[in-house]
Image (cartoon, rainbow, N blue to C red):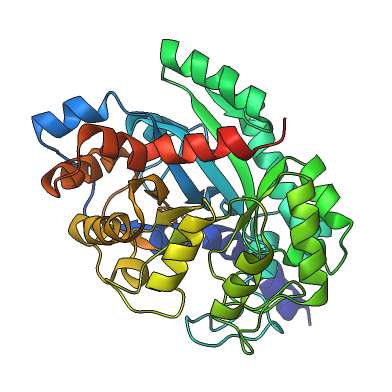
Amino acid sequence: MRKLLLTLLILVPVGAGIFFTIPTLLDRQANSVATPAPYPASDSAEKLHQTLFVADLHDDALLWQRDLLERHDYGHSDLPRLLEGRVGLQVFSTVTKTPRGINYESNGADSDNITLLAMAQRWPRETWSSLLARALYQADKLKQAAAASEGRMVLIHTRSELAAYLQAWQRGPQRLATVLATEGLQPIEGKLENIDVLYDAGFRIAGLTHFFDNEVGGSAHGLDKGGLTPLGRQVITRLEEKRMLVDLAHASKSLIDDVLAIAKRPVLVSHTGVAGTCPGPRNLTDDHLQRIAANGGVIGIGYWDAAVCETSVGAIIRAIRYTADKVGVAHVALGSDFNGTVHAPFDSTGLAQITEGLQRAGFSDADIAAIMGGNVRDLLLANLPD
């Protein structure tokens, strides 16, 4: 017995040490790039890029235990690398639940990967069992980073805050506006009043579903892939009353149809591909592209293989070109899905390569400025709360 106890005393700390290092190892492996920095671009592209206000609609960095204010040699983004890439506005999303055996075709809601990740990253105990607590904890991480950033990172809640930030950015662009989003509304835990809780915590964009069907509606990757539930219809009304933007990324086709049928305000799709260049369960059809554009919405084109069918700048540009040709430049944006367990062509320091690709694809400087960030800026200026 004594020998067994001695063995346990040795093995338990070792096991715990391994357990607590797993998130960093996973982060390094899952959030990878095709080639390491630096990412060269032509002189013409670099010159134009340095004049741009760049905005990205989706980054999952809050899921991981990296300090957003420190530069890292893994993952896709942090404040120093975002600023180097000329990013002026970044939407950070909170991930609260993903199913085991996650895939693009069919996932149930009866399992969860994030519980163990939360434990291994030493998140507060309440996050182990509450999806709402997980969203609020990640929101607090962003608030703390902004507070410690000495003005280099600003959390935006209102149109007036964004307008003031943009004036400051014009005087000195080495700063980043951030907007909070949730990837799926499972954090409301089936309660309409929790929309208000998320709003009060700073959330201004609400993805309806993630990789599984939830109480609000069907996922493109769920079992039923249905439309809005009765609660979901109430949720859309509440979101619009609070001027929170609805995000249709990961939504089933039926859910997209149902939302567009009742939406009175513009929607967005934060990170997606388009079926016209890359068929896939969540990539938007031409019909949905046209209806989202008619709604006044913006479509963020992703960078990973399931969105654009290969890991390359060229594939991203083809999806952007296709979307712009179908519905107009004013409805196209960037939606990287950085740090969302994806393999990307580059990290956030390489965004001038997209600028170069857009030049080669025949876009004008004004069109490039709109795609790279102007459209997101204008959408938020028009639709955030007062």
Tell whether 373 sits left or right of 47.
Answer: right
Give the quarter of the image for residue 384.
top right
Q: Who is closer to the viewer here, 252 or 335?
A: 252
The quarter in which the C terminus is drawn is top right
Percent position (x, y) of residue 25? 46, 60
* Vertical arrangement, residue 185 with respect to residue 381, above or below: below
* Vertical arrangement, residue 16 with respect to residue 1, above or below: above
* Vertical arrangement, residue 158 with respect to residue 287, above or below: above
The quarter in which the N terminus is drawn is bottom right
Percent position (x, y) of residue 275? 34, 74
Q: Residue at x 74, y 67 (%)?
A: 186
Q: How many marks?
A: 0
Q: Which residue is drawn at 47% across and 23% down?
A: 175
Q: Who is closer to the viewer here, 331 or 21?
A: 331
The answer to whether any part of residue 151 appears in the image is no
The answer to whether any part of residue 333 appears in the image is yes
Q: Which residue is drawn at 52% across and 50% down?
A: 296
Tell whether 165 sits left or right of 10.
Answer: left
Q: Which residue is drawn at 26% across and 25% down?
A: 50
